[in-house]
Amino acid sequence: MAGGAPKRPRSPRQGRPAPQARTGRGAQAEADVDKAASEGIRVQKLLAGAGVASRRGAEDLIRRGLVTVDGRPAVLGERVDPARAAVEVEGRRVALDPGKHYFVLNKPAGVVTTMRDPQGRPTVLDLLGASERVLPVGRLDTATEGLLLLTNDGELAHRLTHPSFGVPRTYLAEVTGRPGRAAVRRLTEEGVPIGEGMTARADDVTIVDALPRGPQGEGRSLVEVTVHEGRKHVVRRMLAAAGLPVVRLVRTQFGPLRLERLAPGSYRRLSHAEVAALYRAVGL
Ligand code: URA
């Protein structure tokens, strides 16, 4: 911050305790706070702004020792840099940076997961009325529907899509055929060949329901599949390899994030708790 001495809290109620009241870890906390005091925003204000609690509620959380800043107990009135500090409430990371945006979109079939399409097809950007610049986290096929996360939080997006983090994705698939135990076992215990090699084992395959027959009288079923790999068309290809071609595919969950009751084509901002859960899922 340009020029000027660090602003000190005026009222003892809102400010930090007097230095003489602090010893040991408290003194260290005081020193840390002094260092950060020249910049940033008061922690209770940040927490209120992030939707964690009202300003008073946030103050109460801090007094009760439930808030940490970079791993040490937060001090009421201290200023933190929201772009850099790791603030946690009861061990859950809070997304503080006001420049970071997180949306979940229920992508309909026929919409492409790009921001612009040379063929002029509708894109997810067309659906996202929000003016903030965000990017899709991974891709859904044009024909696939359901949960698509969009954010400008690059580190989170990287971790959510990088294979080493193995973030699970859950899909509801309408398939042709009646899956038997052997198909489920192959998918979950062995993996199946999909051109460039074997798939990883699916985390879970559940036969949800037998559906009405298709137009040619073929049996159809509803299957829930959870995988932790993001290879192109992986669910369609793995189910086809198990003898269950996909008729319709909807992603319902991505890590801890659920689609819930979001109408096709609409989107919403993630709640503080949802962002915190995503952070936790990838070790942030
Ligand atoms: N697997 C697929 O086959 N398609 C998707 O869109 C996502 C995962």
Image (cartoon, helix red, strand yellow):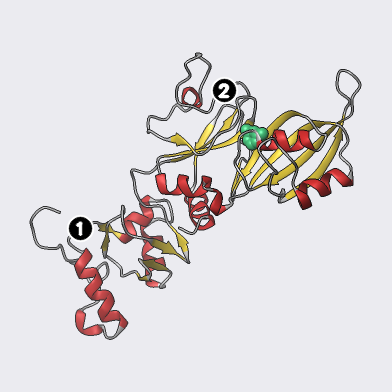
Q: Nearer the viewer, residue 131 or 142?
A: 142
User: Split into 4 quadrants, where in the image is the C terminus?
Assistant: bottom left
Where does label 1 land, which residue?
39
Secondary element at image label 1: loop
> For residue 12, what is the image quadrant?
bottom left
Front-lying residue, 164 or 58:
164
Vertical order, 238 against 95 (above or below): above
Residue at the front extreme of this rendering:
196
143 sits to left or right of 100: right
**Spot occupied by residue 281 in the image (x, y as percentages of width and height):** 54, 56
Q: Is residue 242 visible?
A: yes
Q: Position of residue 75 (x, y in %)?
A: 31, 70
Residue for point 83% across, 49% down: 185
Q: Residues within 10 Å of mark 1 (few under 14, many from 20)?
A: some
In this view, 29 is above or below 226 = below
Q: How many numbered marks, from 0 up? A: 2
Dot 2: within a 10 Å radius of its alpha carbon, few (fewer than 14), some, or many (20 or more) residues?
Answer: many
| Secondary structure type for disc 2 | loop
Alpha carbon separation for disc pair 2 and 1? 44 Å
Viewer-closest of 94 and 225: 225
Residue matched to label 2: 111
Amino acid under label 1? Glu
Question: Which residue appears at 84% of the width and 43% of the height?
Answer: 183
The N terminus is located in which quarter? bottom left
